[in-house]
Amino acid sequence: MALETGIWTVSANGSNGDLSITSVGLNGALSGTFFSQKIIGFWDDAAQKITFLREINLANDPASIQLYTGYRFTDGVTKKPTITGSFVAYEGAAKAQRTDFGWYATKA
């Protein structure tokens, strides 16, 4: 199943916002925004896996990039498309003792 474009409602480590998938190319390349910040990444249709980089403040702080990975499924209760996974934050947004955080999204 292809990844649905449009707005997804997100919770990432307790912060709530939107994931907007604007395009998914034939080669799986995707683009959009996450919490209104640019993302670039890939959609693996066979694995139902999304991987993307969130560019928080790339020009002034290259370490502010976050790497997200998630898997799409249909929730058995709500019947809504859902993605759940984890992300890695780097210096400035994390500490060596904790760099991995959870996130999930449901199709709005």
Image: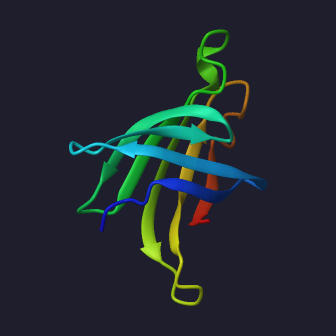
The quadrant the N terminus occupies is bottom left
In the rendered image, residue 84, in percent from the top left (x then y), is placed at 53, 64
Q: Taking the image as drawn, is residue 104 in sight?
A: yes
In the rendered image, residue 45, in percent from the top left (x then y), is placed at 27, 59
Specify the color scheme.
rainbow
13 and 5: which is toward the camera: 5
The residue at the point 68 percent across, 43 percent down is 98
- In the image, residue 15 sits, relative to residue 33, either above or below, namely below
Q: In this figure, what is the number of numbered marks?
A: 0
The residue at the point 27 percent across, 45 percent down is 28
Which residue reaches farthest top?
60
The residue at the point 67 percent across, 9 percent down is 60
Q: Taking the image as drawn, is residue 103 in sight?
A: no
In the rendered image, residue 47, in percent from the top left (x then y), is placed at 28, 62
- In the image, residue 92 sits, relative to residue 46, either above or below, namely above
- In the image, residue 6 sits, relative to residue 28, either above or below, namely below
The quadrant the C terminus occupies is bottom right
46 and 108: which is toward the camera: 108
Position of residue 98 in the picture relative to residue 79 (left or right): right
Which residue reaches farthest bottom?
77
25 and 59: which is toward the camera: 25
The residue at the point 43 percent across, 66 percent down is 72
In the rendered image, residue 30, in percent from the top left (x then y), is placed at 38, 41
Position of residue 105 in the picture relative to residue 32 (left or right): right
Which of the 4 image quadrants contains residue 35? top right
Position of residue 45 in the picture relative to residue 65 (left or right): left
